[in-house]
Amino acid sequence: MVNPKHLLALAFTQLVGVSSVSAVVDVQKKSNTGITKASHNTMLLSGQEVRKNRIIISAKNVAAIKQIVQENDLKIIDSYSHISKLSNRWVGVLEVRPKYSLPVQLQAASMQSMMSTLQSDNRILQADYDSIVWAAETPNDPKYSKLWGLHNTGQDNGTEDADIDAPETWELFSGSDDVIVMVIDSGVDYNHPDLARNMWKNPGEIEGNGIDDDQNGYVDDIYGIDTANNDSDPWDDHYHGTHCAGTISARGNNGLGVVGVNWNAKIMACKFLNENGSGSTSDAIKCLDYMIAQKQSGQNIVASNNSWGGGAFAQTLLDAIETAGEAGILFLAAAGNEKADNDSDPYYPATYDSDYVISVAATDRNDQLANFSSWGATTVDLGAPGVDTHSTGPNNTYMDLSGTSMATPHVAGVVSLLASLFPNDTPVERKNRILNNVDSISSLSGRTLSGGRLNALKAVESSPFAVAKFSWAKQGELTRQFTDNSKTNRCEIVSWQWDFGDGQTSTEQAPVHSYNSSGWYDVTLTVKGDACAETSSTQAVWAGPNLAPVVDYVHSNEEGFVVNYTDLSKDLDGEVTGWLWSFGDGQTSSEQFPSYKYPYTGTFNVSLTATDDEGASATLTKPVVVPLKYCKSSSFSPSFVAISKVQFGSFSNSSGKSEYSDFLDKTINVNSGDSYNVTISLDSGFWGGNTRIWMDFNLDGFFTDDEMVFEKSGVGTHSGSITIPTTGIKKGHKLGMRVTTGTFGFANQCDSWSPSGGGEMFWGEVEDYAVIID
């Protein structure tokens, strides 16, 4: 049976219209998709979770919205400028500002009253609550054999050829870096070794200079943006988005991990789901607005992957999808894991009636509709592999996940292949190439519009094509041998035209050319087929003495002070064949992608020396920060009990209610062998609490059971004494201290509530501090 923790594309809750008020804050509800909850920033209206005091608005124009805001004492907190401009209206988010601090039931009534007022205003085209959404789930790459959805040989009791025919497709075309897919999700680990080279990088930004170079409102939006936290760093602190990105475009034939449907497509990231996999509709629309802006600036975005959904209709989101579609971008959507008929029980955004939406169900390794997948004879377009999908995870990991979330990126990958092969197609024409060329299977007959499962090969072969491609090799300092590697489908190449970039040309298939002087030359190969369109490819070619490698690397931090290093070095006129890392603490490695565990935290000057196939080398040194980073831990809710103050000797820190608080910037100084009075003050009311404290004495990056130094129960305050040991400790460096309190029992050091799993759910609070032992 599929693990319900991995049935992603969970519950997209959207309320349209006005109905009775439900009880509200910090309550949980169960559904067949899992647990959702209202947090401090949300409320439940008729069982639907929405952002407090926020309404998404589409108005006739700017003048109208200004009048409406003034008349109703509202506040504009966001506007989607690019969607507004293209749709010739004003689209954004308004804040309802109650005059008094109201009980939660009255807050809900106030929201519904304002919604009723706005919906009756003829200057308003659409008003929607800001609902909460949840995440939905042959190359030389060593894990390729696990990717049954790409190539099913019957492995793990599967059915041979119950796949999308990926290797047969790659024989013709394995992808190009001239297209971009935006992953609208929980972010992407852009440093993952299998993704880093395929990440889109904003050409309008200079990385790390702290300046909004392209003046789009985001400073250093190198890989995309984070609308969940309103910043420019779409780092994945969940895992869902990274997994989807790997299925679309994990780097192919790089000797690492897995491979995506498209080996080379660029991934643009927009994080709108938080670390628990939930986010708001307004933040999803903001991702679409950013994507449209980048498209208008010349970035060739061809699709967005949206592995999230469920709930009711929201016109403002549909309008944004339509606007993006008219700009040339398809919207790939997970059909949902409700095991329901979307024709009668709509699941949005997948069920939106739009030419630009492709709704995707999940199939298993035997070509059966997955036992969790929703379907719809008129509302779900096709199926794709979505059970036990192996793909990338954060921090240099790989994961198996199941869900319509995992099926959707298979289709996104094929869209990106088609966009490179047939660049003049409209989005609807690309959609039709996919839906008209599926593998018909009985489990999807009458349950999807196409009646079939995705087949990449059939879609790619739907029209004749030629793809110009070439490589080059040195023959001396100024002479280059050129090799034609072009691919064709249902046509034969009848002519080759080479432009060597120095005014010289050739019509040979594999010419040798000598340059007169050193330099870079833009070489273009144009091929013409007997039954397909002419196509060209251009590369920069170096003629001259051997060039040393261009060295670059990125890193990511794990708990336990482990740093994963990803080499991004390249040799412009050959190959990088050797690597030497110096980790800044005297230790080295010759691996290309090392993981190194540091003995303590701090900033280290890390050097990478790369050597090419002719012995030339170059070195890059960068400062790498190794932070205090421990296992993730947070409560379900601090409503019943919370930590209000921590006193440790002379140290004191007061705090408000939160599921988790990071106070690692606050340092407690202690001496080995000394004892310290400790008091934990609780905001617990009737319930009381159960408090524990751990200290990472040996600084190994983990809170072990024998490092628990405090355990008390009761109402009000918990007091005691902690003695710092004299052995088995690390002196002079920051180490971590974790404080937990729970209502109905003691929490363990790594307990953490998440809709997709991870530790045990508890009511209470977690706080982390730094300690230095002298």
Image: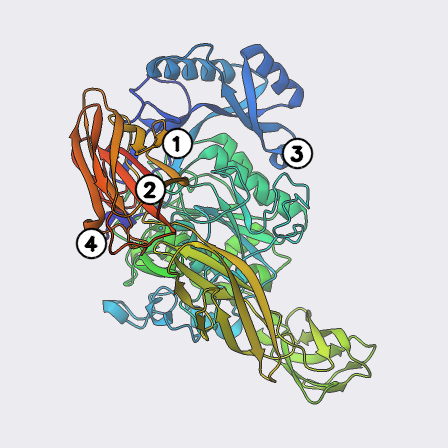
The CA span between labels 2 and 1 is: 14 Å
Q: Earlier in the sequence, mark 4 or mark 2?
A: 4
Q: Name the residue tied to disc 2.
A: 10
Q: Percent from the top left, x then y, of residue 672?
A: 28, 48
Q: Earlier in the sequence, mark 1 or mark 3?
A: 3
Above or below for 440 versus 26: below
Kindly report which numbered mark, 2 or 1, lies closer to the viewer in this rendering: 2
Residue 1: give its label.
4
The answer to whether mark 1 and mark 3 are in CB contact below 8 A is: no
- Which amino acid, mark 4? Met
Q: Percent from the top left, x then y, of residue 139?
A: 44, 74
Secondary-structure class at tag 4: loop
Q: Earlier in the sequence, mark 4 or mark 1?
A: 4
Please state if 633 lies on the left or on the right of 316 as rendered.
left
Kindly report which numbered mark, 1 or 3, lies closer to the viewer in this rendering: 3
**The N terminus sits in image quarter:** bottom left
Q: Residue at x 49, y 31 (%)?
A: 315
- Which amino acid, mark 1? Ala
Q: Which quadrant of the structure image shows residue 640?
A: top left
Q: Alpha-carbon neighbours of circle 3 within 10 Å: few (<14), some, or many (≥20)?
A: few
Q: Earlier in the sequence, mark 3 or mark 4?
A: 4
The CA span between labels 3 and 4 is: 48 Å
Q: Earlier in the sequence, mark 2 or mark 3?
A: 2
Secondary-structure class at tag 3: helix
Please state if 669 lies on the left or on the right of 175 as rendered.
left
